[in-house]
Every structure is written in structure tokens, then in C-alpha cells.
Image (tube, helix red, strand yellow):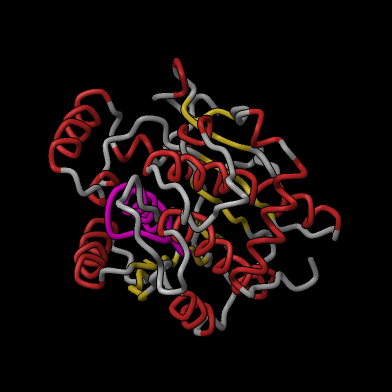
Amino acid sequence: MEQFSTDSIPDLSGKTAIVTGANSGLGLQTALVLAASGARVDLACRDLERGAAAQSRIRAETGNDGVRLRHLDLASLASVRAFAGQQDSPVDLLINNAGVMATPRRLTADGFELQFGVNHLGHFALTGLLLPALRLAPAARVVTVSSLAHRAGRIDFDDLAAEHSYRPWSRYNQSKLANVLFTAEFTRRLEASGESLLAVAAHPGFAATNLTSGMHHPATLDVLGAFFRLLGQSGAAGALPTLYAATGPEVRGGEFYGPGGPGQLRGRPVRVTPAPQALDTGAAARLWDISTELTGVVFPGL
């Protein structure tokens, strides 16, 4: 695994991958590599103009015409349902990558706090609604992209809508912890039902992407952007843990992958141990039940 690179990825011809947030950053890099490996790749993007530019770039660089642009707004359950409702063929890889970070307090179309709504609930709903299509593939995987920030996360079950308290970074940390808890509970349920589908989590370490663009404070944005560019690894390197989780032959359900360098900030992908609070099975089960209630999405058979 320590020698893993994009050259290690097997031929993916005949497989279909969906990558959320594929118009830029880690999502774009992930989609590029999957397309170069022969997969049919659906770019699930909120911004269709930027998505079209990404589609053109990927097709030009890979020669893969099986790259489709599809609209998906994870801040709207109606959009998530419409997207999943159009999927009538098997899905081999679902990469839950899109996210927002440290935004001002905003609500999704359904009244959820934006970061929790997009980073966790939107992907929870998308995965549940696509479960029938994932089951049509012989060895499907769902990779949910978390962050080192999950280490500082706590799930505020008493105020998920952030009506009483809102600190942008705390809510971001919470959403990234939710990604790991979701993967753990999803895995437990899949294994209990004897399914071959794998749920895996990954994080990019410290990667220079445009995730900070959602912030509203110009000075903070400038400082953080410069910090990420100076110290962060490239988006291509940051995508490697996701790509290994999606294609690595030794990957097992419930595992977590990140960079193997000091502090997991950069380096080749390795299996990593999540923070202690991400191993709380009670919190994972409770989050699953609340997510089901909030979204109205039930995972059939689980």
C-alpha cells in the first residue's frame, strides 16, 4: 500500500463511478484518475458551468467519452432524490466527496444546518437512495471523504440545527466526524446482512484545494488559502487515499485511509485509526437513526 500510486489502479473498463463535487479539488482529481483508468464517471455537481469545464478537461486529458455531467445539489433533498431517481444501471463506485467548510450559519433547502446538511445528511440520503443501484454491481464500494478535522469533532445531538450555538469550525468538525460514524454504522449493517458492498472512509491529509472558498471572512480566507498552498500537498496527492479506498485490493469494509506521513498530513495512503469518538458504536447508531428521521431515507434491507 505504501507504494500505491495512480499506476497501481487496475483497469476499470465496464465500471461506473459517481463522484460528488467533481468539478474541482479532490473530486476533480479523483474523477480524472478513475476516467483515465477506463471507468465511466458521472460528475455529480451543483454548479453546472464549472462541471462542464471539468467534464471537458477530463475528456480531453483521458480520451474517455464516458464522462457525464449530472446535476446534484446536496443541500436539497429534492435534488438528491431526483439524481438517484435517474439512476437505472449498476453503480460500482460511489465517492461521497463534496463538502463545504467553516461557512457562515446557513440552512439547506430542508432547514438543516448547511455543513451538517451537505457534508453528512446529503451524502447519507444519496447513498441510501442509490443502494439498489449499488447492489446491482458485483463488488461495489462507497467511499466517504472525511478529514483530519474529525479528531476535534463532537456530535451535538441536542442542537444539530445549530439554533442555540454556531461556531463554523466546530460544525465542520462535527460533519467530518459524522462521515466516519456513518461509515462505521453502514458497515455494521452491511456485515449483519451478509452483503458484499463495502463502505470505506478516507481523508486527504493537508491538501491544497478550494474548500476554503465557502468562508465569508476575506482575511481568514486569504491567510488559510496561503497556508494550504504553502504547506499542503497537491490535490492529486490528496486524492490518493480516496483512490486507494475505492480500488485497493486489500480494502475491507469500515476501514479508514489517509496519508502515511507525520501527523497524516501528507504521504502515500495507509490505513489509519480514527479518533476515539469515531469508534463510539452507540453514537454511530444514534446518528444513523436521526439521519433516517431527518431525511426520510431508509436503507432497504438494512
Where residue 88 sits in the image (x, y, percent)? 56, 83
Residue at point 52%, 48% (across, down):
10
256 relative position to 36: left or right: right
Image quadrant occupied by the C terminus:
bottom right
29 relative position to 41: left or right: left
> Is 300 inside the magenta-drawn segment?
no
Q: Nearer the viewer, residue 83 or 141?
A: 83
Quick check: can you spot residue 23? yes
Image quadrant occupied by the N terminus:
top right
Q: Is residue 235 above or below residue 229?
A: below
Residue at point 27%, 54% (across, down):
24
The answer to which quarter of the image holds residue 197 is bottom right
- The residue lying furthest to the front in this view is 164
Where residue 98 sits in the image (x, y, percent)? 40, 56
The answer to which quarter of the image holds residue 267 is top left
- The residue lying furthest to the top in this view is 262
Where residue 147 sits in the image (x, y, percent)? 46, 38
Residue at point 29%, 28% (across, down):
232
38 relative position to 292: left or right: left
Residue at point 64%, 60% (across, down):
140
Q: Nearer the viewer, residue 191 or 116?
A: 116
